[in-house]
Each structure stands twice: as C-alpha cells, then as structure tokens.
Image (cartoon, rainbow, N blue to C red):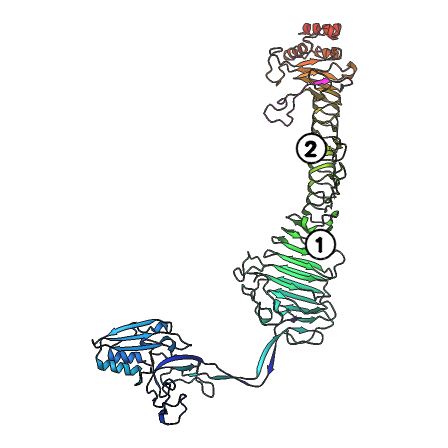
Amino acid sequence: PFTLTESVISETTADSITAITPTIKYITYVGYNPHLHLDTTSVNGTDTGVNNQAGNTNNQTNEGPVDGGIPLYDLNAAGDPATGTDVVQKGMVSYIKDLTGLDFIELGLIDVADTVYGTGNAADLSNMTFTNATTGTQTITINTGDGTVNTAEVSISQEYFALLHDMFFDAEGNSRLYEVERKTWPKVALTDQNGNTVKDSAGAIILVDLYQYTSHGVTTHTYPIVLTTEHNNGGTLETGLTSNGDDTIVAGRLELLHQAYIDGGAGHNILEIDAKGTYAQPAELLNIQEVRVHDLPNFYTIASGDGNLENTAVNGTGFLNPVNTASGSGDDSWIDLTRATAIEKLVVTDGTNGSGGSGSSDPDYSGNLTIVGVRNGATLRLEGAFNSGSTTIQYGEGQTGPLEIELAIGDVKTPIILLQNAAVLHIDSQGVENHMHVFFAGGTVSQMIITGTGAFGVEEDLHAGFNTEQPILIDASANTGGVNLNLTGSQNVTFKGSIADDTFRVNTAEMSNPSPNGYFAHENDHSVTIVDTAGDNHYEVSTYAAAITANGDGNNNFEVSAAVADLKAGDGNNDFELSVGALTLEAGNGNNTVEIVSDYISSTTAPSGSADVVSNIDITFGNGKNVIDVEQDLASTYEGHVNITVGDGGNDIDVVGGRNVAITTGSGDDLIRVVTDKLTINSGAGNDTITIVGADTDYTATYGDGLLFNINTGTGSATINLGSTQSEMNPDGVNDFPYDGYVVAHEGSSITGADITLFVNTIADLSAIKPQNLTGVTKVILDDDNSLYSGSPQANDNTTSATFTALVTSYNAALTAYTTLSDSTTQAQLVQKYDDLDKLISGLTHSDGLDAVTGDTAAQALQFKV
C-alpha cells in the first residue's frame, strides 16, 4: 500500500542577504549653537567661510544647528516620550523645570500624550513666544500644529526669563527647535562564533541591533502528489511505484489529494480517503477501480474553511486553492471524483455522531459530505451511522443502466441524497435492517428494485425521488427482510412485496390531465397494484383503482380508499378497513375483520347524474370466525348488491344498505343482521341469530319497510328477529348495529329451516308469505311492549305493542307443539306452554285462517292436560 503525505521539494540557491528596514522616528530637539547670519549678498548659503559667516540675505536658510542638541522631551530607550523610571535621556523641558521650576507639562503648554511619532514631533510645536512684561509676570505662548494656542503666565526673575528665552531662541530671534531622524532596528541576542549567547557582567543577555540577515541557499515548496507506475515525487511515506498488481492508496486528508496525479496501473486498485478537510479535486485518478470515503470531522480546518496546507487554504496562495463554500462551513467536505475514469464502486462510510456546529465547536461533527462526478454508474455502497450531516452523491458521465446501491447502514437520521438520472434503482439491503429518515433518489426513478436480507425503510415520502409522470414499479420480491415505504403523488404504482413483513403507504394522484373535452375530465385512471406472497403486511392505499393480492399466509392489514378495489388475502387473521365504491374481497381461512363504508362514485363524464362505479360488494372467505360490517348509503339510487360467502366457524355479519344482499355461511353459530330491500340468507348448520329490517319505501305506504327475503337457516336451531330497535341487541348501552325498523314481507318471501323461533318486538307483517314458504317455525315470541323483551309489561298495557301478522294456517304445527306433553312435564313447563300458546293465538279468529279443529282442539287439549 501507499500512504500519501506532503510532497516537499528542497531547492539550493545562492545565499541572499536581506537588509532590515529600520523603524524611523522624528524627534524634536533643541539646538546648541545656531549658525551666524552676517552675509547680505548670498541667498543660498553656499559661501565658503568659517561658520558660513558670509550669511544669507533672506535670514532663513542654514538656521538649523549642526552642533547637536538635546530632545525637547524626556525619552525612553525606544526614543518615545516618557516619564518616571522609563526615562533614559532627559529633555529640555526637564532641564527648564530643574532651573526655573517651570513645568511646561503641568502648565498645560505641552501634552506629551498628544505627540505624533513617525511623522515628526516638530509638527506638534509650530511656534513658541516669550513675552517679558514690566509687571514681573511673563507670558509663554506655544502654538501646536493643529492650531491650538496654549498660554501660561508665570512669575520669574528677569534673569531666569532671559535664560529661558536664550534656550529656545538665538540672538537673531530664530528658534533653536529642529527635528532629528532616529532609526531603530530589531534587537537580537548577541552570539559568539559558536552560536552561544553573550551576556554582560550582570548575567543579562546582550542585545544588539539586527541590520541584516543572510538566507542560505535552500528553499522548500509543497507540490501536488505524483504517483504512477513511472514516477513518485515523494508524496508517499513508502518508496516505490504503483504496479501491475492490486494497489491500495491511502489519503489521510483531503488536501493530499488536491491536484494529485495518481495512476494505479493494472489490477484492482483501491483509493481510501479520510475526508478530513474541506475540498479535494485530483488532477487525475487513473486506473482506480474502487474509492472508499470515510467522512470524518475536519480536524485540520478552522471555522472559516481554511485547510492546514497552502494548497487547500481558502483564499490562500497555493496552487488552485478553493474558495469557501459557505459561511461557517468548516465542517463540510467536498470531493470531486470527475477524473476517476475507471471507477466501478464507491464506498461511503460515516461513523461520527456529532450534533452539528461550525469548525471545532463540536469535535464529533463531520458536517455535510458531497461527492461529485462519479462516473460509469459506479455501484454505491453506504456503511455506518450517517448521523452527522447530510450525504450527497452526484453521478456524472457514463451512467447508462440501473444504478446499484448496497446498504449496510442501520438507522440513519440524516438525509441521503442521490443526484443521478437513472430510471432504475437497485437497492441491495444487507444485514438486518437499513432505515433512512430522508432519501432522495434523484427525481428520475421509475423502477426501484429492492433485494437483500435486510429490511429496507424510508420514513419520509419518496415522491421527490421518482419520475411521477411515469408508471412506478417498486419490486421487493427478492428481499427477505421486508420493506417500509411511503409514496405519494404518482399516478400508477405497482408494488411487489417481499417475503417478509411489508408496510406500504401510497396515495396516487392524476398527474397530467389532457385539456377538458366537453364533459370529460379523465380523472379515473390512477391506480395501485400490490402483489405480496408472504408476511404480515400493512397497506394504506388511496387511489381510484386498487388491486391488492396478498395471497400468502399471514395476518395482513388493509386500509384502502378507492373507487374500485380488488383485494385478495390468503389464510390468516386479516383486517380490512375499506372506503370503496365497488369491491371484490377474497380471503382464505382465518378470523378476518372487515369494516366497509361503500358508496357509488358519481360520474366524471357526460351524461351528468350517471354513476361511474355502482357500489357492488362481493366478499368470499374461507373457514373462520369472521366479523364483517358493511355500510352503504340507503338513500342512493346507485347502490348495488352485497354478496357475502363465508365458511364454517360462526360469523358475525352486519349489512346496512345495498339493493340486493345475499349471505351464505357454513356451519357454526352465526350472528347476521341486515337492513336492505332484497335479502337471501343461507346460514348452514348451527344455532344462528338473524335480524332483518326492511328498507324498501315503495312497497307499503303505511311503514315503508318492505323487504323481499328468502331465509334458509339449515339444520340447527335459529332465531329470526323480525324488525329491530336501536337498543334491542345490547341492553348494556353498547350497540354496533344501531338501526331500527319494521319488516313488511314482499310476495315471494320465505323462511325455511329446522327449528326456528320468530321474535317480534316491532311490527312484522308476513301475510304475503304463502304457507308452504313458511316452514320450520316452532315458536313465535311477541315482545308486546315494542321494546326490550326483559321486564315487558302485559300484553296491550301500552300503545307500543308489538304487532305480528301472518297466515295462521302456517302455525298449526306450532300450535300442536305447544300442546304436546309428556309424563315428565313439570308444572312450570305447563304454565310456560300455556302462556306461549295464549300469546300465539291471542286475538286470532277463524276468519284469520285459523284451523278451527286444530286450533280449538289444541287449546282444549292443553287446557285439559293443565
């Protein structure tokens, strides 16, 4: 393997001497001996003569003294005005104070703190005037460069005044003030020829001025790394060249790759990148088949985005240095793989868990990782936690087929973003589970193929990653871990489930309607098709046409809202929560639960008022204890039929609505309750309880509860409740069938069975039933208060008495049964039979069709036996 490091190259050149530029200060001095000015002919002071005694006619040139002077102020070692112990050279002001007692600073004539250094102190003192008054009070006036006039009146003797005047002015009245240019150099320790520091007698290091330094002829430069089969410019810790075998090249920081030229040679070559740093754009990555990127915090980067080396410093002086990507983006990393022309696989890992922050505010935060220019549709493998910033992969040239993705990521909290243009995305979900909160697949995907052993899930909507204008296919049939996906906004969606537990939520939409043509709106062509062969699956579907087949064994949950639905499930305890127009529902053996709200779908096309979908419901289940609730709009003229066929096991079936209801059950104790216009029930063997309520308002004007029904209870005992009150079945106040109504039988109605009890607590009129169509009835119970049977008052005690009308000839067998006694009949049983018989024939006469012989004989026989 090769480990990249800085490629530093030294160059030998001639020694160079560099002079140190001194620091220049201009200090105001007071001169000792100004020149004489006696000449009256010359104006430029070029006359020869001692002290220029020829002088100048203008009396202005050559007034500056050349014999030296002293500073105006006290100075420190650096030549700056000073006070106290810092003073190393006293100035004129101090001498005046010593001689005359006058303190120019205290008098406010001179402010040492306001002096300007570097541009000359003389500018601060533009004029000075001494006025000798005859009163003994002298006036001193000082003009500064900014126009300020400072005046002080002092009392000194004439002698002191004359001395003070002569200190600052010559005999001709010219000022003795002048400027001295003072240069200072940096101080360095004095060393001997062996390089040892020289100290004074007190042990202090002797400092001297540094006037110049000599650079010996060796310079170093950092260059882009070159590593090929023929060249290595020193940018690796190991020596040698890449070979014809398999080479691994490791870049520990991004800046090591910046502008690098790498050729891996023949073989399968791997480039490993630790993404510590902000930016890398290699010049060439030739013959590199696999790139592995590990996103890490940018330990070598400050908050502004500057890298550790000059070649990646923001606004630095290195070769092709980048600009800052964004304010405070020191945590983010960009890698340009455009020049990796042979890449076949890209592996990206992120194992940090920082919460975010700029620069070093959170040492665990690796920031957002962006990798661009991935060629050849290289397989992408994601490993690690991905909890520290988003990860964006941008694909470039050479992407022609499906994009392959391998996942071994666990639960990912930060966004995974793919910028690519493939229509087919193949996801290999490895391990146990791969779950992302946000996953953007590029916006061009129309087919997502999911394989592997791990469960695959995305918490957010996948809508943005798909091409919603195209039919969408999500195929997880080769996955053994299960999927959990959410998709909205597509028009036609097909989902093939895994062989494990799947959760799929989909909401389709009409994507591109053509321009309206008359009354045609074309809003009925979006659909969802689901095929699942195994697992306990959960589906939430909202669309126009839904076709779901979960034909494997499992406990599935269907939550479907559709105009047309075709649903199939295998054996298992399935749950169906459906809001549909037309429905075909099939399931195998199991305890299924069904809740259906059904209505017709109004027309989207002309003529108005027609129905696109009539609410026909067809349900077929195998054996099991099924609970089925169907509700349709009774007021609609477009309600269709409800056909329910279930097997053995004892079923609980409620149907409200539908113009034609047909229910077939196997053996078992069934509970069936129906409100409809036309009803057929074949309940098979078992002790069944059936409640029927008519809903045909056209049959009779009196009650409007007409019903054409044909009921065959099969073998076993059965109770048929003719009509219903809201609280009839649930005196505890809980009622899952809150419907009341009467029964007025249509002609052609029938009741057949083996041992049937007719229970009436409303109004039941079976007079239209022919005697031969009313068989197997052994008992009729009138709950005469038209309310709860328990605790009923005596017959006709109030005005809400239950009413039962029928052809009595149909009840001769019942009368005979009531009078059939044995020697073992108890007194209580005799009383009960008498009461039941009295209820059965109370109010009936021969004119009602009662067989006089049979009826009278039965009554007499019973009375005799009692």
Tell whether position 222 is magenta. Answer: no
Q: Residue 648: image x %, image y %?
A: 74, 30
Quarter in which the C terminus is drawn: top right
What crowding class fits label 2: few (fewer than 14 Cα within 10 Å), some (14-19), or many (20 or more)?
Answer: many
Q: Residue 289: image x %, image y %?
A: 72, 65
The answer to whether one can see residue 82 in this image is yes
Q: Residue 730: image x %, image y %?
A: 61, 24
Q: Is residue 505 above or below residue 335?
A: above
- Label disc, if present, on residue 483 of the rendered structure: none
Q: Main secondary structure of the magenta part?
A: loop
Q: Which residues are magenta?
A: 726-748
| Element marked by disc 1 | strand
- Label disc, if present, on residue 596 of the rendered structure: 2
Q: Is residue 576 above or below residue 329?
A: above
Q: Mark 1 sits on what residue?
A: 428
In the image: residue 72, left or right of residue 699: left
Tell whether position 746 is magenta. Answer: yes
Of the residues shown, which amino acid type is indicated by label 2? Ile
In the image: residue 770, left or right of residue 156: right
Of the residues shown, which amino acid type is indicated by label 1? Asp
Sequence order check, earlier mark of 2 and 1: 1
Q: How many marks?
A: 2
